[in-house]
Image (tube, rainbow, N blue to C red):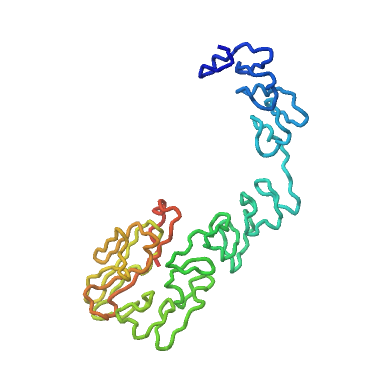
Amino acid sequence: RCDGRTDCTDHSDETNCPCKDHEFRCGDGRCIDVHRKCDGTADCRDYSDERNCECKDNEFRCSDGTCIDKARRCDRTPDCRDRSDEHGCPVPGCTAAQFKCGDGRCIDIRRKCDDRVDCSDFSDEANCVSEACRADEFRCKSGECIRISGRCDKRRECPDGSDEEDCCTSEEFHCKSGECITKQLRCDGHYHCRDGSDETGCRTCQLDQYVCANAQCIERSKRCDGRFDCTDFSDEADCPPDAGINIRVYPERQTIKQGQEVVFRCRDEGTRRSQVKWTRPDNHPLPPGSTDARGRLTMPNVQPDHGGVYLCRAEGAPGGASGAQKAAFLTVQPCKYPDYCAFFPRTRRH
């Protein structure tokens, strides 16, 4: 008891002991060397050895009586236990040629709303005047305009990151104006991109050739011959029925979010009323969990790599029969948070 060494776990053996002449009694009853009183370092657990000290000229007195170096006053880091060294600090002003960031920094006013983030809190690119973006620019959801080349380049350039949202999949064409369309709409003679970029740079075919929807050229005789020759399968679309077979799919195109369920329906509307079967090109298997029941193809929990072409063909159809098979196109948009994709509307049909 009171031997200067703590033996009780609650320090009670060294509490309220009489202090020696060269010692200072802390507020909790402990004794410390008097030279450690007001030395700038708290040795008492209750900081009482640093309270009500006479601060030096180069020191600041905290509200609780402790002293700290004056250089620590208003440095945006609390050093006083009660944080009083950061109270009532003057707010540094910026000049007329500067913009004040939300974090207090000053930047050149010309860097405000220049589509480049200079303030750590993005405040230099917030609340910018909403003007029309140029044809070669993309508008962020937060209102800023950035270079169109920065759209979906895997680098965040919009303060809110919207330039990297809803980016095109491998089955889509990326318009220069920023939106995504299915590749089958590229070079089909109709504008689908806002800037018409889906109809630029398209090839022309010879008079004895058939122009596929994707601008591919094939021999005209291969049109509606019962075999797919266009890589987008358009050479067998809208063919007159042959041998009593007229395969139809509903819908022909779908775009859905990752993780959702998609359904395609197929039937023979010709006089033959053939049984039908769903397959994928090049003998690729249907996605896991898929069911094909009397022309109803159901695919749960689709993933981006499940996008592409699905073929419905009449079973037992003679070779070369026009209208014996039909293609359906699926685009799967990657979901940033797959667990929440189920909350999106099931499908968007074309």
**Number of marks drawn:** 0
| Residue 22, percent from left and from top | 69, 15
Q: Residue at x 43, y 69 (%)?
A: 182
| Residue 70, percent from left and from top | 73, 34
- The image quarter containing residue 238 is bottom left
Q: Residue at x 43, y 87 (%)?
A: 206
- Is 33 or 103 nearer to us in this picture? 33
Q: As displayed, is residue 152 above or below residue 229?
A: above
Q: As displayed, is residue 55 above or below residue 313?
A: above
Q: As displayed, is residue 298 above or below residue 30?
A: below
Where's the N terminus, which quadrant?
Answer: top right
Where's the C terminus, which quadrant?
Answer: bottom left
- Is 302 or 350 nearer to us in this picture? 302
- Is 159 or 81 nearer to us in this picture? 81
Residue 178 lies left or right of residue 326; in this view the side is right
Q: As displayed, is residue 159 above or below residue 72?
A: below
Residue 300 lies left or right of residue 145; in this view the side is left
- Is 34 or 255 nearer to us in this picture? 34
| Residue 13, percent from left and from top | 54, 14
| Residue 34, percent from left and from top | 68, 18
Residue 280 lies left or right of residue 173; in this view the side is left
Farthest bottom residue in view: 207
Q: Residue at x 50, y 66 (%)?
A: 179
